[in-house]
Image: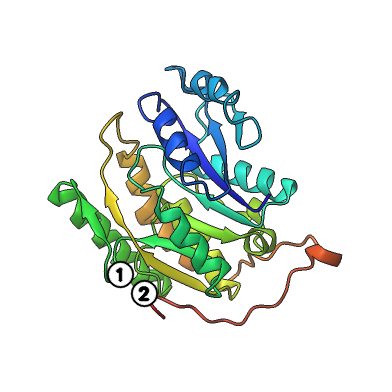
Amino acid sequence: MEKIVIIPTYNEKENIANILEAVFTLNQGFHVLVIDDSSPDGTAEIVQSLQNKYPSQLFLEQRKGKSGLGTAYIHGFKWAIEKGYAYIFEMDADFSHNPKDLIRLYEACKHFGSDVAIGSRYVKGGGNVNWPRNRVLLSKGGSLYTRMITWMPVHDPTAGFVCYKKEVLETINLDEIQFVGYAFQIEMKFAAWKLGFKIKEVPIIFEDRRFGSSKMNKGIIKEGILGVLNLRWQSLFKNYRSRVKKTGSLQVQAYNNEVMVGEGK
């Protein structure tokens, strides 16, 4: 068990079967953990029906209520670490992330020395497709704002298409991650950067969802704006390093404080 893709879902019945099929037909050994927040549209039931087809590759965790993207990923991270996966991925269910790019993110961590590989829209070769102009401006403006406030040299800090080495998630105190929406993605990258892990941005083309409805709302945007300010302030006092000491094969190695941003660096 080496690679697992975590896909949080809420009302994704139009997409879930197709996205799972797309991941498994890559034939690259990816497992998938779907974390469903009690979708009333039957998303979880679709996943359960597919577990008969992929009994050793597809897993489902069901949570009561809609608890937020961040808590879903934290739940998945802890689950994956406990099961011993070496490479742990975040990916959306709606095909805004091309499943074929999972391979490139994996290679960045497996073969090219990265600890965190980010599918980035805002490095050379990346971009957005089918997004309205105001959404693009909001996203790019948010990324620039985040870089200016946090000083974190990541061009796409809100990206939700990411590969983490297990050691990164073991080192971060996941219980200290406070944001659950838009700012969750920023905080996870910020924590990895502050702890000195190597970050690589891999260019991707992000395509707006074709089916289902976007989960973006005013509350998520507000959390992002205010959250970045709070994140920068708390960084003066906060230590994201886990207090759990690892031993033997799980001992966390020291990493130098190098960040690789952009393609080919």
Inspect this view and state whether residue 246 appears. Answer: no
Which residue is found at the position 25% from the left and 43% from the top? 208
Inspect this view and state whether residue 143 appears. Answer: yes
Mark 2 surroundings: few (<14), some (14-19) or many (≥20) residues within 10 A: some
Q: Which residue is mark 1?
A: 123
- Vertical placement of residue 127 versus 67, above or below: below
Tell me if 15 is positioned left or right of 209 in this view: right
Whole-number angstrom distance, CA of label 1 to CA of label 2: 7 Å
Q: Position of residue 21 (x, y in %)?
A: 45, 35
Q: Are marks 1 and 2 in contact (CB under 8 Å)?
A: yes
Q: Quadrant of the C terminus?
A: bottom left
Q: What kind of residue is marked 2?
A: Glu
- Vertical placement of residue 152 versus 224, above or below: below
Q: Which residue is mark 2?
A: 263
Question: In the image as oriented, which residue stretches furthest toward the right?
Answer: 248
Tell me if 10 is positioned left or right of 170 in this view: left
Question: In this view of the protein, which residue sits in the foreground, 195 or 149?
Answer: 195
Q: Position of residue 16 (x, y in %)?
A: 43, 30
Q: Closer to the N terminus: mark 1 or mark 2? A: 1
Q: Position of residue 111 (x, y in %)?
A: 55, 71
Q: Which-is-in-front pick, marks 1 and 2?
A: 2
Q: What kind of residue is marked 1?
A: Val
